[in-house]
Image: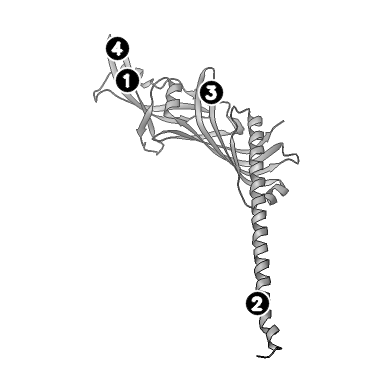
Amino acid sequence: MTIADAPTRRAPRRRRAWWRWWVGALVVLLGLLVAADRIAVAIADTEAAKTFQKSEGLDHRPSVRIRGFPFLTQLAGRDFRQVDLTATDLLLGRNGKTVRVAKLTLHLHHVRVSSHFNSARADTVQAEAFVSYADLSSAAGIPIAYAGPSADGRGRIKATKTVTVAGQQITGQISAEVRISADDVLSFVNPQVSVAGATVPQAVADQLATAFGAPIPLVRLPFGLRLQSVTAGPTGITISLQGANLSYSSG
């Protein structure tokens, strides 16, 4: 090997070291950008939760998560593809007839915010509200449980009631389907009465069929939502809701 050959053989090593340095720097830079993006979205989630709480007059601050990556490009355009929101412990109803909603989950699509970020508009909203049987029992004034599936797949609920007829107490089990009416009322329909497998007079069956009480008005729904349908499951009832072109403002 001659002296002239030595620099030629060391050059590839220097080039490899140079490229490793650039790759390492690029990885660090990308990591910093991702970290900045995630920090920014965390701050935005908190501010959005404050806006929604004030806009809807909620007792508890909801949980908000802005979806999509990167967040900063959405922020620059003030247009977010999807915002998920979870609110808890909501009370719906009127005139003393109320029911507690344990959890309300919303998926807001194409949310556009104002230049000052104190108002927003969502193109569409899909939501689900969950009411436990304990809370439904409190609203109806009688212990309610799951009665199993129904022919249409929406499920049935059941309760046990005792009535007095001609001085004799009769205890029967009543099952019913839960439905949402056009005026946003939760109703109990298509009752079926069973008294130890025996046939009872219609008057007795009618008394037992009233076990679930009056329908429950689900008014004062937050976020401008409209009721769509309800399904009974093993732990409670799930209500589907939706909305379109809804506006929110913190004032």
Residue 88 on image: x %, y %: 54, 32
**In the rendering, which numbered label is found on residue 43?**
none
Upstream in sequence: badge 4 or badge 1: 4
- Asked which secondary structure carries label 2, the reply is helix
* Foreground disc of the pair 1, 2: 2
Going from N to C along the chain, the mark reached first, 2 or 4, is: 2
Indicate how the structure is coloured in the image. one colour
**From what the image shows, is residue 43 above or below residue 15?**
above
Q: Quadrant of residue 200?
A: top left
Q: Is disc 1 placed on a helix, strand or loop?
A: helix
Amino acid type, callout 2: Arg
Q: Quadrant of residue 61?
A: top right
Residue name at image x 66 percent, y 79 percent: 12
Q: Which residue is mark 3?
A: 93
Q: Earlier in the sequence, mark 3 or mark 1?
A: 3
Q: Residues within 10 Å of mark 3 (few under 14, many from 20)?
A: some
Picture coordinates of residue 243, whole percent (x, y): 59, 37
Residue 183 in view in this figure: no
Report the label total.
Answer: 4
Residue that protrudes farthest toward the right in the picture: 115
Q: Circle 1 sits on which residue? A: 205
Above or below — where is 207 with respect to 1?
above
> On residue 13, which mark appears?
2
SS type, badge 3:
strand
